[in-house]
């Protein structure tokens, strides 16, 4: 019978690697605590309409990448979430968070997303996103804060060579003014553009500028920039964001072609990139979405956020040779010299664990030499040895593995002694 294998575009995160994930997740949660962002957990699947309306029907996500869920007992159209912002905003509206006395509402999420795309390094069909959203303020300072939060995570994990690319995609009115001039240019080269761009010209021409096809990039390199059509308000907002980033010491470059891949963005759009990471150069992206809350049925509230892939982050750390200070091993291994000592060892391990000590014992009836080798493999800081004489005296031998130092200690005192030495 053939073995059942893992689905394409997914991965098993095994012991020995998952500890890196724990470290990054703990760092992200601590950063959010410092920035006063609070966790929100939304369903893994939502109404398909949420993403059609929230992400945009002309986006690659909606057109090509969503996993739709069918249920023969229900007519509801459901989709595994391909991104986090739409679900967070839906929850914001549904739970009336606009009425919270603490404004703006600042939330973060950390969990799996699903997109049917071609798997490659750092890109999976099931992937984990960390994202943050601030809803309820149009202050350009919070745009800079959101960018700083994402940058701070990368920096505190030890990445270097990071850069911020910044743009303003304006308001809906700004884009309407820009659209007619952009269409004049695009219609002049329509027949030479890729099929995706040809289909987007009439529906969302700004997205043509986001195409990764080299021919399309060349054909549109002289297209009119959205920055030339910003209203005074949008231009002032953009200048203020840049000024706040400068105040924080965050260097940036303005990229007028960057529009991001989601339709809900307005005004500020940004990406964080790292040099020499190949196909996954972009580590993080985000922007302002001032019309999204209203689009999903709420009052017209401004918002801004970002999302980043933990898989890409891990790949970036690997590329730069960054070693995270992940603790390995256990605190104490309890070795059994005689079968009569098994019950006492079993009780001791439970008491050690109750005292906060990571403890293990032998479950394979190995000889003492093999047990001590197992303690080494587990990188135990201490080994406790219990034999016939120790049972008779109510003691055990405590060995510090790094120094080899041994001493006899009463069994009742061991949990407190080990916990104290562990600090």
Image: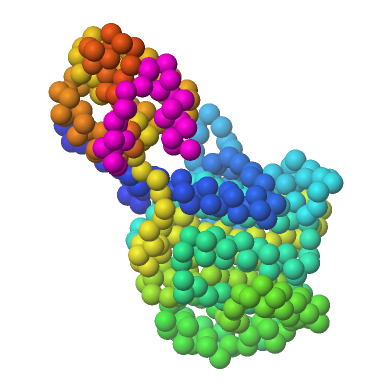
Residue situated in front as seen by the camera: 203 or 48: 48
Residue at point 61%, 74% (across, down): 250
- Can you tell which quarter of the image residue 215 is in? bottom left
Q: Is residue 116 visible?
A: no
Label tally? 0
Q: Is residue 128 left or right of residue 383?
A: right
Q: Is residue 61 left or right of residue 239?
A: left
Read off the magenta span.
398-423
Residue at point 44%, 48% (across, down): 21
Residue situated in front as seen by the camera: 323 or 223: 323
**In magenta segment, residue 411:** yes
Residue at point 46%, 31% (across, down): 419
Colour basis: rainbow
Residue situated in front as seen by the camera: 177 or 84: 84
- Can you tell which quarter of the image residue 192 is in? bottom left
- Can you tell which quarter of the image residue 116 is in? bottom left
Residue situated in front as seen by the camera: 145 or 339: 339
Q: Position of residue 104 (x, y in %)?
A: 78, 54
Residue at point 52%, 65% (across, down): 155
Q: Position of residue 332 (x, y in %)?
A: 35, 31
């Amino acid at each position: 019978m053939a073995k059942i294998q893992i689905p394409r575009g997914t991965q098993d995160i095994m012991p020995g690697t998952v500890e890196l994930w724990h470290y990054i997740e703990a760092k992200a949660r601590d950063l959010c605590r410092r920035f006063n962002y609070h966790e929100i957990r939304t369903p893994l699947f939502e109404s398909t309409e949420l993403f059609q309306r929230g992400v945009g029907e002309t986006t690659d996500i909606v057109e090509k990448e969503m996993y739709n869920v069918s249920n023969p007992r229900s007519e509801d159209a459901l989709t595994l979430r391909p991104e986090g912002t739409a679900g967070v905003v839906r929850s914001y509206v549904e739970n009336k968070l606009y009425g919270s006395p603490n404004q703006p509402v600042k939330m973060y999420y950390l969990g799996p997303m699903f997109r049917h795309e071609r798997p490659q390094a750092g890109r999976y069909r099931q992937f984990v996103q960390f994202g943050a959203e601030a809803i309820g303020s149009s202050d350009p300072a919070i745009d800079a804060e959101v960018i700083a939060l994402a940058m701070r995570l990368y920096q505190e994990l030890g990445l270097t060579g990071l850069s911020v690319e910044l743009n303003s995609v304006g308001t809906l009115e700004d884009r309407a003014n820009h659209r007619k001039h952009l269409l004049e240019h695009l219609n002049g080269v329509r027949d030479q553009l890729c099929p995706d761009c040809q289909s987007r010209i009439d529906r969302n021409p700004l997205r043509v500028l986001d195409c990764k096809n080299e021919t399309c990039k060349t054909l549109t390199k002289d297209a009119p920039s959205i920055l030339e059509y910003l209203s005074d308000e949008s231009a002032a907002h953009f200048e203020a964001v840049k000024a706040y980033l400068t105040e924080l010491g965050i260097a940036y470059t303005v990229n007028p072609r960057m529009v991001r891949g989601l339709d809900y963005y307005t005004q500020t759009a940004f990406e964080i990139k790292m040099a020499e990471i190949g196909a996954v150069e972009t580590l993080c992206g985000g922007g302002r979405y001032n019309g999204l809350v209203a689009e999903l049925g709420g009052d017209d509230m401004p918002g801004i956020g970002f999302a980043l892939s933990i898989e890409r982050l891990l790949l970036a750390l690997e590329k730069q040779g960054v070693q995270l200070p992940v603790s390995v091993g256990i605190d104490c291994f309890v070795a059994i010299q005689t079968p009569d000592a098994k019950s006492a060892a079993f009780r001791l391990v439970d008491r050690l664990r109750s005292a906060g000590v990571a403890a293990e014992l032998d479950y394979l009836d190995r000889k003492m030499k093999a047990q001590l080798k197992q303690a080494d493999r587990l990188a135990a800081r201490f080994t406790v040895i219990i034999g016939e004489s120790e049972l008779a005296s109510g003691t055990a031998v405590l060995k510090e593995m790094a120094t080899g130092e041994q001493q006899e200690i009463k069994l009742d005192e061991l949990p407190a002694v080990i916990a104290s030495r562990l600090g």
